[in-house]
Image (tube, helix red, strand yellow):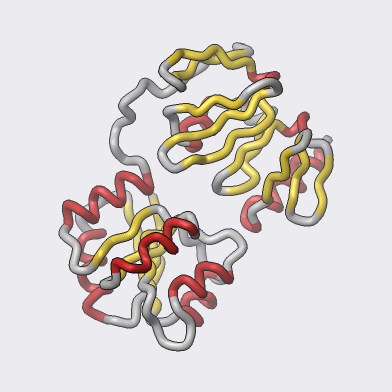
Amino acid sequence: MTRYLIIDDEPIAHRIIEGYCQKLPYLEKAGNCYDAFEAMQLLNQTQVDLIFLDINMPELSGFEFLKSMPDPPATIVTSAHKEFALEGYELDISDYLLKPFSFARFLKAMNKTIGVKMPTAPTPSVEKGNTHFFIKGDKKIHQIQFEDILFVEAYGNYAKIYLEQEMILSHEKISSLEEVLPAGEFLRVHKSFIVATKKIKTIEGNRISIEEHKIPIGQTYKNGLMKRINKR
């Protein structure tokens, strides 16, 4: 179940989005907020996986609010102003819905954000005890050894797999790869990053060093990382 929050100063926008969300059984409403400050308070109190965010709001704009969060949930911007779309994508939003938008356009945004559509390529799978898996990328099928993986980075509807000698752009989402990678050897440390724990060189503040790479630690994932470290 995906818990969503609507942040918009227009009540009619809440009604439209709620109506669309009610058609999708995998969505559950976490709340309604009419300004950024109300949203900040709610986000500190409850789990939210997805926000529908308006841009033009009193005192603090949607983008200013988004920039203030160290590790925001998946975000779909809903706005009547198309000229802000580029700035939105630079902030790593999932999609930009131009008001008024249809249910078909809304559904497309949800499929892109949550990945409820069936993947076009077979999801990689491994048998218990295997040391590798096969995955499609760069118009080839690659055999990946678990021990060669440094980390995985989300890249829209794709994922970058960083190996010791190369980087492979995979046709899979990071969520699919998280299911494949052995939980005892890999850990999600950010909504956009999975790391091979034995490859971690140092942890400093909210950054992990793996070879020459610096990987951010999401606030919601930090406790899990520290628990894993303390077990070793």
- Relative placement, left or right, of 13 versus 184 is left
Assign the C terminus to one quadrant of the image.
Answer: top right
Front residue of 95 and 198: 95
- Relative placement, left or right, of 116 versus 186 is left
Residue 94 spot, x, y in % from top left: 40, 53
Which of the 4 quarters of the picture holds residue 198?
A: top right
Residue 225, placed above or below residue 181: below
Residue at (80, 41) in percent of width and height: 229
Residue 43, placed above or below residue 135: below
Residue 106, placed above or below residue 44: above
Front residue of 138 and 185: 138
Residue 80 spot, x, y in % from top left: 26, 72
Residue 96 spot, x, y in % from top left: 33, 59
Front residue of 187 and 67: 67
Residue 222 spot, x, y in % from top left: 70, 52
Residue at (30, 45) in percent of width and height: 111
